[in-house]
Amino acid sequence: MLLRRSSKNPLVSVTVLALAILSPCLSLAEGAPSPLVQQFDAVVAASMRDGIVPGLAAALIVDGKIVYTKGFGATSVGNAEPVTDRTRFGIGSVTKTLTAAAVLTLRDEGKLSLDDPASRYLPELTSVRDPRARLLTVRQLLSGRGCVPDIFVGSNASATALESHARQLMADARFDLQCVPGHGYVYPNFGAVLTGLIVQRVSHQPYEDYIEQRLFLPMGMRDSTLRYWQPQALRTNRGHYRSVSGPARVGEGVMGRSVGPTGMASSTAQDMATYAATLLAGGVAPNGKRVLSERAVNELFQANGEARSEIAAAVPGIETEYGLGWEINQAAGLRFIGKGGSTGVMSAYVALLRQQRAAVIFLANLVDYGKVQLVFNGLTLLTGGTPKPYVTLPVANTPPQPAAARPALFEQLPGHYDTLEYDLGGFSIVQHDGRYSMTSVAGALELVPDGDGFRTVSDLADFNGRAYTLKVTHGRAEIWQNGKKFAYRTLTAPR
């Protein structure tokens, strides 16, 4: 969902990027010098030459002013319709920053406190099987310090989806906090869901209505929406999966209204630039309206403790703390505020330099972590440095000769599995003519034996080469990934 972080995404094989050594901050003149805009335009164009992403839109803010918004490529493979600065993209987890901003507007109105027990607004937390949940605060839910597990119990587009599914989440037997609240960090996917429900309950409005009326409209973000279920939510823009051997393939992200607060907003380069400019101006939108208090903006960017950056795999050595919905990053000598997002088939990233009142933004209709280079090259330009040449990242590939499987173990693979994280109703593994396949959002994935487990084979880079281990224990077949239990099924009879 980025919903899903790159650091948690096992589908992406990312090589080390050569980052520029960024020079000390320089004072930017009023307006943007034409050469700077031209250089940034060249940086974005260079990132598109590998043809991986069908369409992309970018924006640049200098000295608080939006000086560049532009689209590149097309809205889908095989479609000649060009991307513009008003093309809508799913921004994924950048939505978390909107949820955090909404909470702070309610705080400024005296309707809640960040350090209130979350159970004051979510009494269901007092009945959660993990008693530590009663100690959770609103701030901890937003900052990842609440240690809330990722358990996606399903979703739909009904008006009651957020309420009903959040309540299901809190009642789920798997709802165990992953660390002691306030003393650890878990990426706040479902912390944001619960916080979105708080916004809904305190404001007495549907979450989508509150965000649109309290944030989008006052800022002038008239092309942004949280109503993904409406036919024209993304207009003609389509999401894509990266292919191993050919052009990108159109795909649909699988989410729903119940995860709206954590990743379902859609926006444009123009609107995201407006949003960034508002934050850089201390809460005053380009149209002159104050949308957030200066105190609220400062709290969004105030560190609450160490975290793992969602772009850590692409940026070696990055140091990160988490604010409220935003990351505070230190890399290559530069301190910047950032937030990325992915819907699985679209992606976005916003990077802010508060001191210079500058920002770099991109939106893409495919998830390609190589585009992080675009962000750093933009930041390099803003700080007077020289961008590095763009490097295309390779796709993940299944090893050509995986180890032979243990037959008795592999025979126990077929069946329906329940997943422990990001539960979309589970998945099935079937066997036909001696070959095995797994259902997925991208269709059936072929499975090849690999020792005590298997790997997936697919023409789609995001799904190719995933490695899993199969364990049979306590009457269950368990599938593990990266050292964590991923899914399970109960065996019909002891084996």
Image (cartoon, helix red, strand yellow):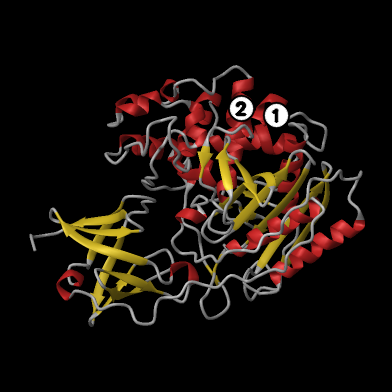
**How many numbered marks appear?**
2
Q: CA distance from mark 2 to mark 1?
A: 8 Å
Label placed on residue 104: 2
Marks 2 & 1, CB-CB < 8 Å contact: yes
Label placed on residue 20: none
Q: Is residue 169 visible?
A: yes
Amino acid type, label 2: Leu
Mark 2 nearby-residue class (10 Å; few <14, some 14–19, many ≥20): many
* Image position, residue 39 (x, y; %): 83, 62
Q: Is residue 110 left or right of residue 456?
A: right
Relative depth, front residue between 494 and 10: 10
* Image position, residue 74 (x, y; %): 69, 69
Q: Image point 52% across, 74% down: which residue? A: 243
**Residue furthest toward the left?**
494
Amino acid type, label 1: Leu
Label placed on residue 292: 1
Relative depth, front residue between 152 and 294: 294
Label 2 sits on a secondary structure element that is helix
